[in-house]
Image (cartoon, rainbow, N blue to C red):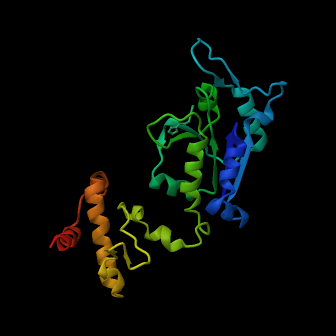
Amino acid sequence: MRIDVFTIFPAMVDAFAGQSLLGRARAAGVLDVRVHDLRSATTDPHRSVDDAPFGGGAGMVLMPGPIFEVVDRERPPRPLLYLSPAGRRLDQTLAHELAAMGGFSLLCGRYEGVDERVRRHLVDGEVSIGDYVLAGGEVAAMVVLEAVGRLVPGVLGNEDSVAEESFADGLLEHPQYTRPAEFRGWPVPEVLRSGDHARIARWRRAQALARTVRCRPDLIEARGGLSEDERRLLAELDG
Ligand code: JF5
């Protein structure tokens, strides 16, 4: 899978993509992340990418020229997605949709954003990582890279963990424990050491449900409430 990123801070994104899970996937040839410097298509001595807004006001706007030039030159995979609070909110469904594509590209804005002609005539869509304002799209692009990258087959090296994870069925994760079996007087739940895999699976499901009901009732609502089986499972926990 190929993901191209356009930014005025290529070193930031490139360093991130070279570390940890993404770095290993990249080295293994599973993920082809290409980072492009928006300044690479500038021609003036100052390598300018921004200018003052027509109509006045604070801040600077990324000029269309350098962005169109570098995108035309690199012919990146489409869709080309602009990171902005106006975009479709990133969630696990969108992450899966993007992971199922052969590739896509990300455009990072800075300052007051990009010239509107970039949005209207160059990008294919917009993605938001949440309702807050960042100083630039780079951190948002890194969030997309990580959320999507880990779903690409061969990246995690453990395909079970993607299939197993709670968000796959709209629930939060069940609690996890590792050694020691008792830490500062706090024991690991007995069921997890029982070796009874059916009982462990039921306990985990019940814990995930209870945690989601308590912390994220909106997620329960979104999956259409609790089934009769799920109500019974939760009742067992209380009893
Ligand atoms: C950006 C101009 C874009 O702030 C964001 C953002 C918030 N949620 N998702 C993305 O993007 C960065 C900064 C300045 C345009």
Image position of 19 with respect to 45: above or below: below
Residue 54 position by quadrant: top right
* Residue in the image at 65% along x and 34% along y: 122
Residue 235 position by quadrant: bottom left
Q: Please indicate whether residue 40 sits to the left or right of residue 143 in the image.
A: right
Image position of 195 with respect to 234: above or below: below
Q: Nearer the viewer, residue 204 or 96?
A: 204
Q: Please indicate whether residue 61 sits to the left or right of residue 130 in the image.
A: right
Q: Please indicate whether residue 29 sits to the left or right of residue 109 in the image.
A: right
- In x, y percent, where is residue 69? 76, 33
* Residue in the image at 45% along x and 51% along y: 91
- In x, y percent, where is residue 168? 42, 64
* Residue in the image at 57% along x and 14% along y: 57
Ligand 1 picture quarter: top right
- In x, y percent, where is residue 23? 68, 60
Residue 225 position by quadrant: bottom left
- In x, y percent, where is residue 76? 71, 46
Direction left: furthest residue: 239
Q: Please indicate whether residue 83 sits to the left or right of residue 236 in the image.
A: right
Q: Nearer the viewer, residue 220 or 237?
A: 237
* Residue in the image at 50% along x and 74% along y: 160
Q: Nearer the viewer, residue 66 or 20?
A: 20
Image position of 136 with respect to 167: above or below: above
